[in-house]
Image (spheres, grey):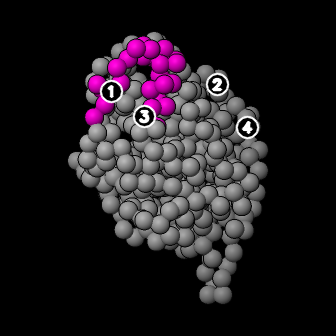
Amino acid sequence: MKERTLDFTNKTILVTGVAGFIGASLVRRLVSDCPSVVVLGVDSLNDYYDVRLKRARLDELRRLAAGRQFVFRQISTADKKAIEALFAEYHIDIVVNLAAQTGVRYSITNPDAYIESNIIGFYNILEACRHSCEGGEPGVQHLVYASSSSVYGANRKVPYSTDDNVDNPVSLYAATKKCDELLAHAYSKLYNIPSTGLRFFTVYGPAGRPDMAYFTFTDKLVNGEKIQIFNYGNCKRDFTFIDDAIEVVLRVIQRAPLRAIGADGLPVPPYAVYNIGNSHPENLLDFVTILQEELVRAGVLPADYDFESHTQLVAMQPGDVPVTYADTQALERDFGFKPSTPLRQGLRKFAEWYKAYRQANPAASST
Protein backbone atom coordinates (compact mmCIF):
# COMPACT_ATOMS: atom_id res chain seq x y z
CA MET A 1 0.00 0.00 0.00
CA LYS A 2 1.24 3.50 -0.82
CA GLU A 3 0.71 5.88 2.06
CA ARG A 4 1.84 9.12 3.61
CA THR A 5 2.91 9.59 7.22
CA LEU A 6 0.86 12.11 9.19
CA ASP A 7 2.44 14.37 11.79
CA PHE A 8 0.47 14.28 15.07
CA THR A 9 1.83 17.63 16.27
CA ASN A 10 -1.03 19.94 17.32
CA LYS A 11 -3.57 17.72 15.60
CA THR A 12 -7.18 17.24 16.71
CA ILE A 13 -8.30 13.61 16.64
CA LEU A 14 -11.97 12.67 16.91
CA VAL A 15 -12.56 9.29 18.56
CA THR A 16 -16.16 8.07 18.49
CA GLY A 17 -17.22 5.36 20.94
CA VAL A 18 -14.66 6.85 23.32
CA ALA A 19 -16.23 5.32 26.45
CA GLY A 20 -16.00 1.86 24.88
CA PHE A 21 -13.27 -0.68 25.43
CA ILE A 22 -11.09 0.04 22.39
CA GLY A 23 -11.94 3.75 22.28
CA ALA A 24 -10.92 4.43 25.88
CA SER A 25 -7.78 2.33 25.52
CA LEU A 26 -6.76 4.26 22.40
CA VAL A 27 -7.29 7.66 24.04
CA ARG A 28 -5.32 6.53 27.08
CA ARG A 29 -2.32 5.95 24.81
CA LEU A 30 -2.85 9.17 22.86
CA VAL A 31 -2.96 11.45 25.89
CA SER A 32 0.00 9.64 27.46
CA ASP A 33 2.27 9.43 24.42
CA CYS A 34 1.27 12.46 22.29
CA PRO A 35 1.23 15.56 24.52
CA SER A 36 0.42 18.03 21.70
CA VAL A 37 -2.60 16.10 20.43
CA VAL A 38 -6.12 17.21 21.35
CA VAL A 39 -8.56 14.30 21.54
CA LEU A 40 -12.23 15.00 20.97
CA GLY A 41 -14.18 12.07 22.39
CA VAL A 42 -17.79 11.26 21.50
CA ASP A 43 -20.05 8.59 22.98
CA SER A 44 -23.80 8.15 23.45
CA LEU A 45 -23.27 6.25 26.74
CA ASN A 46 -26.12 3.87 25.89
CA ASP A 47 -27.06 1.10 28.31
CA TYR A 48 -26.16 -1.91 26.13
CA TYR A 49 -23.97 -2.83 29.10
CA ASP A 50 -23.32 -1.31 32.52
CA VAL A 51 -22.86 2.44 32.03
CA ARG A 52 -20.82 2.59 35.25
CA LEU A 53 -17.94 0.85 33.49
CA LYS A 54 -18.12 3.37 30.63
CA ARG A 55 -18.11 6.27 33.08
CA ALA A 56 -15.17 4.74 34.95
CA ARG A 57 -13.19 4.67 31.71
CA LEU A 58 -14.06 8.32 31.04
CA ASP A 59 -13.07 9.32 34.57
CA GLU A 60 -9.66 7.72 34.04
CA LEU A 61 -9.19 9.58 30.77
CA ARG A 62 -10.06 12.91 32.41
CA ARG A 63 -7.52 12.24 35.16
CA LEU A 64 -4.79 11.35 32.66
CA ALA A 65 -5.48 14.38 30.46
CA ALA A 66 -5.96 16.75 33.42
CA GLY A 67 -8.36 18.83 31.31
CA ARG A 68 -5.75 19.77 28.72
CA GLN A 69 -5.89 17.21 25.93
CA PHE A 70 -9.28 15.55 26.21
CA VAL A 71 -12.75 16.94 25.46
CA PHE A 72 -15.82 14.73 25.85
CA ARG A 73 -19.24 15.21 24.29
CA GLN A 74 -22.18 12.89 24.94
CA ILE A 75 -23.43 12.57 21.36
CA SER A 76 -24.78 9.74 19.23
CA THR A 77 -23.23 9.46 15.78
CA ALA A 78 -26.78 8.79 14.54
CA ASP A 79 -27.67 12.41 15.43
CA LYS A 80 -26.67 14.11 12.18
CA LYS A 81 -27.19 17.67 13.39
CA ALA A 82 -25.03 17.06 16.45
CA ILE A 83 -22.24 15.59 14.32
CA GLU A 84 -22.45 18.49 11.87
CA ALA A 85 -22.25 20.98 14.74
CA LEU A 86 -19.23 19.17 16.16
CA PHE A 87 -17.34 19.36 12.86
CA ALA A 88 -18.31 23.02 12.51
CA GLU A 89 -16.95 23.82 15.98
CA TYR A 90 -13.67 21.91 15.71
CA HIS A 91 -11.06 21.61 12.99
CA ILE A 92 -10.75 17.82 12.99
CA ASP A 93 -7.67 16.32 11.35
CA ILE A 94 -8.16 12.59 11.97
CA VAL A 95 -11.28 10.55 12.71
CA VAL A 96 -11.22 7.16 14.43
CA ASN A 97 -14.76 5.80 14.26
CA LEU A 98 -15.16 3.11 16.91
CA ALA A 99 -18.80 3.87 17.76
CA ALA A 100 -20.89 0.83 16.88
CA GLN A 101 -23.50 -1.54 18.15
CA THR A 102 -21.55 -4.73 18.65
CA GLY A 103 -22.42 -8.35 19.29
CA VAL A 104 -23.75 -11.11 17.05
CA ARG A 105 -26.57 -12.49 19.18
CA TYR A 106 -27.94 -9.10 20.23
CA SER A 107 -28.45 -8.25 16.55
CA ILE A 108 -31.06 -11.01 16.30
CA THR A 109 -33.32 -9.49 18.96
CA ASN A 110 -32.48 -5.78 18.56
CA PRO A 111 -31.79 -5.13 14.86
CA ASP A 112 -32.81 -1.44 15.00
CA ALA A 113 -29.79 -0.60 17.15
CA TYR A 114 -27.43 -1.92 14.46
CA ILE A 115 -29.00 0.03 11.62
CA GLU A 116 -29.04 3.23 13.68
CA SER A 117 -25.44 3.07 14.92
CA ASN A 118 -23.55 1.04 12.33
CA ILE A 119 -25.26 2.31 9.17
CA ILE A 120 -26.81 5.72 9.87
CA GLY A 121 -24.12 6.72 12.38
CA PHE A 122 -21.28 5.76 10.05
CA TYR A 123 -22.96 7.52 7.11
CA ASN A 124 -23.13 10.71 9.19
CA ILE A 125 -19.41 10.46 9.93
CA LEU A 126 -18.63 9.96 6.24
CA GLU A 127 -20.74 12.97 5.27
CA ALA A 128 -19.02 15.11 7.90
CA CYS A 129 -15.59 14.03 6.60
CA ARG A 130 -16.70 14.84 3.06
CA HIS A 131 -17.86 18.36 3.90
CA SER A 132 -14.82 19.07 6.10
CA CYS A 133 -12.84 19.65 2.90
CA GLU A 134 -15.11 22.40 1.59
CA GLY A 135 -14.14 26.07 1.37
CA GLY A 136 -10.49 25.32 0.69
CA GLU A 137 -10.02 23.60 4.08
CA PRO A 138 -7.66 20.59 4.23
CA GLY A 139 -10.36 18.68 6.11
CA VAL A 140 -10.04 15.21 7.55
CA GLN A 141 -6.74 13.68 6.50
CA HIS A 142 -7.51 10.10 7.52
CA LEU A 143 -10.63 8.19 8.54
CA VAL A 144 -9.94 4.99 10.46
CA TYR A 145 -12.93 2.85 11.36
CA ALA A 146 -13.71 -0.41 13.13
CA SER A 147 -14.86 -3.31 11.02
CA SER A 148 -15.02 -6.88 12.32
CA SER A 149 -13.85 -10.43 11.69
CA SER A 150 -17.57 -11.25 11.53
CA VAL A 151 -17.61 -10.10 7.89
CA TYR A 152 -15.97 -13.42 6.95
CA GLY A 153 -19.15 -15.26 7.89
CA ALA A 154 -18.89 -19.04 7.51
CA ASN A 155 -15.82 -18.80 5.26
CA ARG A 156 -14.17 -22.23 5.29
CA LYS A 157 -10.83 -20.98 4.00
CA VAL A 158 -8.43 -20.24 6.84
CA PRO A 159 -6.66 -18.11 7.75
CA TYR A 160 -9.02 -15.31 6.72
CA SER A 161 -7.45 -12.91 4.24
CA THR A 162 -8.65 -9.43 3.34
CA ASP A 163 -8.57 -10.69 -0.27
CA ASP A 164 -11.29 -13.25 0.52
CA ASN A 165 -14.87 -12.84 -0.65
CA VAL A 166 -17.03 -11.57 2.23
CA ASP A 167 -20.42 -11.44 0.54
CA ASN A 168 -22.09 -14.08 2.72
CA PRO A 169 -22.65 -12.67 6.23
CA VAL A 170 -24.35 -14.93 8.78
CA SER A 171 -25.55 -12.15 11.09
CA LEU A 172 -27.00 -8.66 10.79
CA TYR A 173 -24.01 -7.34 12.72
CA ALA A 174 -21.66 -8.76 10.07
CA ALA A 175 -23.82 -7.34 7.29
CA THR A 176 -23.66 -3.84 8.77
CA LYS A 177 -19.88 -4.00 9.08
CA LYS A 178 -19.53 -5.14 5.47
CA CYS A 179 -21.81 -2.25 4.53
CA ASP A 180 -19.47 0.15 6.36
CA GLU A 181 -16.54 -1.06 4.28
CA LEU A 182 -18.51 -0.54 1.06
CA LEU A 183 -19.61 2.94 2.11
CA ALA A 184 -16.05 3.90 3.02
CA HIS A 185 -14.80 2.66 -0.35
CA ALA A 186 -17.44 4.69 -2.20
CA TYR A 187 -16.64 7.89 -0.29
CA SER A 188 -12.90 7.34 -0.80
CA LYS A 189 -13.50 7.00 -4.53
CA LEU A 190 -15.94 9.90 -4.91
CA TYR A 191 -14.49 12.42 -2.47
CA ASN A 192 -10.83 11.38 -2.08
CA ILE A 193 -11.18 10.64 1.65
CA PRO A 194 -8.29 8.42 2.85
CA SER A 195 -9.88 5.61 4.85
CA THR A 196 -8.66 2.46 6.56
CA GLY A 197 -10.90 -0.29 7.93
CA LEU A 198 -9.75 -2.57 10.75
CA ARG A 199 -11.25 -6.05 11.01
CA PHE A 200 -10.81 -6.77 14.72
CA PHE A 201 -10.63 -10.38 15.90
CA THR A 202 -12.04 -10.86 19.45
CA VAL A 203 -10.28 -8.06 21.31
CA TYR A 204 -10.03 -8.75 25.06
CA GLY A 205 -8.29 -7.51 28.18
CA PRO A 206 -8.69 -5.38 31.33
CA ALA A 207 -11.73 -3.09 31.42
CA GLY A 208 -13.14 -4.95 28.43
CA ARG A 209 -16.69 -5.37 27.20
CA PRO A 210 -18.88 -7.20 29.74
CA ASP A 211 -20.81 -8.95 26.94
CA MET A 212 -17.69 -10.81 25.74
CA ALA A 213 -17.34 -14.47 26.66
CA TYR A 214 -14.34 -14.14 28.97
CA PHE A 215 -16.13 -11.41 30.98
CA THR A 216 -19.56 -13.07 31.11
CA PHE A 217 -17.96 -16.41 32.05
CA THR A 218 -16.14 -14.72 34.91
CA ASP A 219 -19.29 -12.98 36.15
CA LYS A 220 -21.25 -16.23 36.08
CA LEU A 221 -18.56 -18.25 37.83
CA VAL A 222 -18.22 -15.61 40.56
CA ASN A 223 -22.01 -15.73 41.03
CA GLY A 224 -22.06 -19.53 41.16
CA GLU A 225 -23.90 -19.86 37.82
CA LYS A 226 -23.22 -22.25 34.96
CA ILE A 227 -21.35 -21.12 31.86
CA GLN A 228 -22.42 -22.40 28.46
CA ILE A 229 -19.71 -23.49 26.03
CA PHE A 230 -21.14 -23.34 22.52
CA ASN A 231 -20.78 -25.91 19.75
CA TYR A 232 -19.89 -28.36 22.50
CA GLY A 233 -16.47 -26.72 22.78
CA ASN A 234 -15.60 -27.31 19.11
CA CYS A 235 -14.92 -23.64 18.38
CA LYS A 236 -11.67 -21.78 17.82
CA ARG A 237 -11.19 -18.05 18.24
CA ASP A 238 -8.35 -15.73 17.30
CA PHE A 239 -7.99 -13.63 20.47
CA THR A 240 -6.33 -10.19 20.27
CA PHE A 241 -5.02 -8.57 23.44
CA ILE A 242 -6.07 -4.92 23.79
CA ASP A 243 -2.52 -3.52 24.00
CA ASP A 244 -1.64 -5.17 20.68
CA ALA A 245 -4.83 -3.84 19.07
CA ILE A 246 -4.07 -0.29 20.23
CA GLU A 247 -0.50 -0.46 18.96
CA VAL A 248 -1.89 -1.35 15.54
CA VAL A 249 -4.43 1.50 15.61
CA LEU A 250 -1.75 4.03 16.55
CA ARG A 251 0.46 2.93 13.68
CA VAL A 252 -2.41 2.88 11.21
CA ILE A 253 -3.80 6.33 11.96
CA GLN A 254 -0.40 7.91 11.29
CA ARG A 255 -0.16 6.43 7.79
CA ALA A 256 -3.05 7.35 5.51
CA PRO A 257 -3.58 5.69 2.11
CA LEU A 258 -2.15 7.95 -0.58
CA ARG A 259 -4.44 10.24 -2.55
CA ALA A 260 -4.06 10.01 -6.33
CA ILE A 261 -6.05 10.66 -9.50
CA GLY A 262 -6.74 7.86 -11.94
CA ALA A 263 -6.91 7.83 -15.74
CA ASP A 264 -10.66 8.46 -15.55
CA GLY A 265 -10.06 11.78 -13.81
CA LEU A 266 -11.53 10.46 -10.55
CA PRO A 267 -9.61 9.67 -7.37
CA VAL A 268 -8.01 6.26 -7.07
CA PRO A 269 -9.66 5.18 -3.82
CA PRO A 270 -7.23 5.95 -0.98
CA TYR A 271 -8.65 2.94 0.83
CA ALA A 272 -7.32 -0.03 2.79
CA VAL A 273 -8.57 -2.83 5.05
CA TYR A 274 -6.50 -4.89 7.51
CA ASN A 275 -7.02 -7.86 9.79
CA ILE A 276 -6.18 -7.22 13.45
CA GLY A 277 -5.68 -10.62 15.05
CA ASN A 278 -3.19 -12.85 16.81
CA SER A 279 -2.99 -15.40 13.95
CA HIS A 280 -3.20 -18.17 16.53
CA PRO A 281 -6.72 -19.58 17.05
CA GLU A 282 -7.37 -21.03 20.50
CA ASN A 283 -9.73 -23.92 21.19
CA LEU A 284 -12.63 -22.71 23.32
CA LEU A 285 -12.15 -25.48 25.91
CA ASP A 286 -8.47 -24.53 26.27
CA PHE A 287 -9.49 -20.89 26.59
CA VAL A 288 -11.91 -21.74 29.43
CA THR A 289 -9.26 -23.80 31.21
CA ILE A 290 -6.72 -20.96 31.08
CA LEU A 291 -9.34 -18.43 32.23
CA GLN A 292 -10.25 -20.61 35.20
CA GLU A 293 -6.61 -21.05 36.20
CA GLU A 294 -5.94 -17.32 36.02
CA LEU A 295 -9.08 -16.47 38.01
CA VAL A 296 -7.88 -18.79 40.77
CA ARG A 297 -4.37 -17.35 40.60
CA ALA A 298 -5.70 -13.81 40.96
CA GLY A 299 -7.91 -14.76 43.89
CA VAL A 300 -11.14 -14.07 42.02
CA LEU A 301 -12.19 -17.68 42.66
CA PRO A 302 -11.09 -20.07 45.43
CA ALA A 303 -8.54 -22.78 44.68
CA ASP A 304 -11.11 -25.51 45.34
CA TYR A 305 -13.76 -24.09 42.98
CA ASP A 306 -15.74 -26.90 41.30
CA PHE A 307 -15.51 -25.88 37.66
CA GLU A 308 -16.94 -29.09 36.25
CA SER A 309 -20.30 -28.54 37.91
CA HIS A 310 -20.44 -25.00 36.57
CA THR A 311 -19.88 -25.74 32.86
CA GLN A 312 -22.35 -26.93 30.25
CA LEU A 313 -21.65 -27.91 26.65
CA VAL A 314 -24.39 -26.64 24.29
CA ALA A 315 -25.11 -26.36 20.56
CA MET A 316 -23.93 -23.52 18.32
CA GLN A 317 -25.87 -20.27 18.56
CA PRO A 318 -27.42 -18.59 15.47
CA GLY A 319 -24.96 -16.19 13.85
CA ASP A 320 -21.88 -17.82 15.38
CA VAL A 321 -19.09 -19.41 13.35
CA PRO A 322 -16.87 -22.37 14.33
CA VAL A 323 -13.50 -20.66 13.78
CA THR A 324 -11.92 -17.24 13.35
CA TYR A 325 -8.33 -16.97 12.16
CA ALA A 326 -6.60 -13.80 10.94
CA ASP A 327 -4.09 -13.62 8.12
CA THR A 328 -1.99 -10.60 9.17
CA GLN A 329 0.66 -10.66 6.44
CA ALA A 330 -0.49 -7.33 4.98
CA LEU A 331 -0.42 -5.72 8.42
CA GLU A 332 3.11 -6.96 9.07
CA ARG A 333 4.26 -5.86 5.61
CA ASP A 334 2.87 -2.32 5.84
CA PHE A 335 3.37 -1.55 9.55
CA GLY A 336 6.07 -3.92 10.78
CA PHE A 337 3.92 -5.24 13.61
CA LYS A 338 1.56 -8.07 14.43
CA PRO A 339 -0.36 -8.88 17.63
CA SER A 340 1.43 -11.62 19.55
CA THR A 341 0.51 -11.46 23.26
CA PRO A 342 -0.07 -15.04 24.52
CA LEU A 343 -3.61 -15.78 25.69
CA ARG A 344 -2.52 -16.69 29.21
CA GLN A 345 -0.65 -13.41 29.64
CA GLY A 346 -3.66 -11.43 28.46
CA LEU A 347 -6.16 -13.32 30.62
CA ARG A 348 -3.86 -12.92 33.63
CA LYS A 349 -4.00 -9.14 33.24
CA PHE A 350 -7.78 -9.31 32.88
CA ALA A 351 -8.17 -11.47 36.00
CA GLU A 352 -6.04 -9.09 38.06
CA TRP A 353 -8.02 -6.09 36.80
CA TYR A 354 -11.34 -7.85 37.44
CA LYS A 355 -10.47 -8.51 41.06
CA ALA A 356 -9.51 -4.88 41.66
CA TYR A 357 -12.56 -3.54 39.81
CA ARG A 358 -15.05 -5.72 41.67
CA GLN A 359 -13.49 -4.81 44.98
CA ALA A 360 -13.84 -1.10 44.14
CA ASN A 361 -17.31 -1.59 42.62
CA PRO A 362 -19.05 -4.40 44.53
CA ALA A 363 -22.39 -3.67 42.85
CA ALA A 364 -20.92 -3.79 39.33
CA SER A 365 -22.97 -5.86 36.90
CA SER A 366 -22.57 -7.09 33.34
CA THR A 367 -26.13 -6.12 32.47
Q: Which amino acid does label 2 sit on?
A: Leu
Tag in front: 3 or 2: 3
Tag in front: 2 or 1: 1
The residue carrying pointer 2 sits among few (fewer than 14), some (14 to 19) or many (20 or more) residues within 10 Å by Cα, namely some
The earlier-in-sequence mark between 2 and 1 is 2
Q: Mark 3 points at which residue?
A: 288
Q: Name the residue under label 1.
A: 308
Q: Name the residue under label 2.
A: 64
Across and down, in percent, residue 215 comes to: 41, 31
Q: Does the magenta stretch include residue 12?
A: no
Q: What element carries label 2?
A: helix
Q: What residue type is labelled 4?
A: Cys
The earlier-in-sequence mark between 3 and 2 is 2
Q: What stretch is highlighted in magenta?
A: 287-312
Q: Which amino acid does label 3 sit on?
A: Val
The earlier-in-sequence mark between 2 and 4 is 4
Please state which of residues 219 and 138 is positioned toward the viewer in this rendering: 219
The earlier-in-sequence mark between 3 and 4 is 4
In the rendered image, is residue 260 in sight? yes
User: How far apart are labels 2 and 4 at the CA level?
Assistant: 12 Å
The numbered dot on residue 87 is: none
Q: Residue at x 51, y 49 (%)?
A: 281
Q: Which residue is drawn at 39% across and 61% down?
A: 153
The numbered dot on residue 34 is: 4
User: How far apart are labels 4 and 1 at the CA level?
Assistant: 47 Å
Counting the numbered discs, the total is 4
Across and down, in percent, residue 224 comes to: 30, 19
Q: In which quarter of the image is residue 359?
A: top left
